Amino acid sequence: MEEKLFKKFEKKLAPAIKEMHRLMVDSCNRPDHLKMIREITKWDRIVKTYNQGEVHWAVYHSSTAEQWQVFRAGLKGLTTKQKLYMLEILLVRTDGAVYVAGLRDAPKGTNLTEAQKERDLNYIRVDNYLGALVRGGQLDASYCVQRD
């Protein structure tokens, strides 16, 4: 069932995925990013395990599932280190949005609860994606890079 769902997303969102991949490649090839990417040996954040329902909701059915699918599919063709770098950027931006939303003088219309929900969804998505990299042999069980 899941395979059909992500294949549907990939077909429906093909132009956006192609553009996302191009942007990711461009970002990874920036001189200031190349050094950081080369130095990646493992995923340093704590990885949690979520139940199937939480993962399924976050990946396929939440209001931002399409954005995640574009991001996820855009990672295809990148090296393992580049994937880890892009996943880290996603989480740093998500954490930053929560921080900004929590500021006393946050921009009008900023919603802390929504930012927190999106952060939680992205952590579920990233942790699930890391599990796929382990199953695929790109990372070992300790999330160390095995294949780049």
Image (cartoon, rainbow, N blue to C red):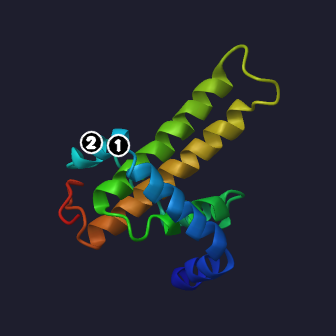
**Visible residue check, residue 50:** no
Residue sitting farthest toward the right: 108
Label 1 SS: helix
**Gap between marks 2 and 1, in whole Å?**
7 Å
The disc at residue 31 is 1
| Residue bearing the label numbered 2 | 35
Please tell me which residue is depicted at 29% across the width and 55% down the height of the picture.
Answer: 81
Please tell me which residue is depicted at 23% across the width and 71% down the height of the picture.
Answer: 137
Q: Picture coordinates of residue 15 (x, y %)?
A: 65, 72
Give the residue type at disc 2: Lys
Please tell me which residue is depicted at 19% across the width and 61% down the height of the picture.
Answer: 140
Check the picture and name the quadrant holding the N terminus. bottom right
Q: Picture coordinates of residue 29 (x, y %)?
A: 38, 52
Give the residue type at disc 1: Pro
Asked if 113 appears above or below 65 in the picture, the reply is above
Check the picture and name the quadrant holding the C terminus. bottom left
Asked whether disc 2 touches disc 1, contact meaning CB atoms under 8 Å apart, the reply is: yes
Work out whether residue 59 or residue 24 is closer to the camera in this orientation and state it: 24
Q: Rate crowding at label 2 as few (under 14), some (14 to 19) or many (20 or more) other CA atoms within 10 Å.
A: few
Q: Is residue 76 left or right of residue 96?
A: left
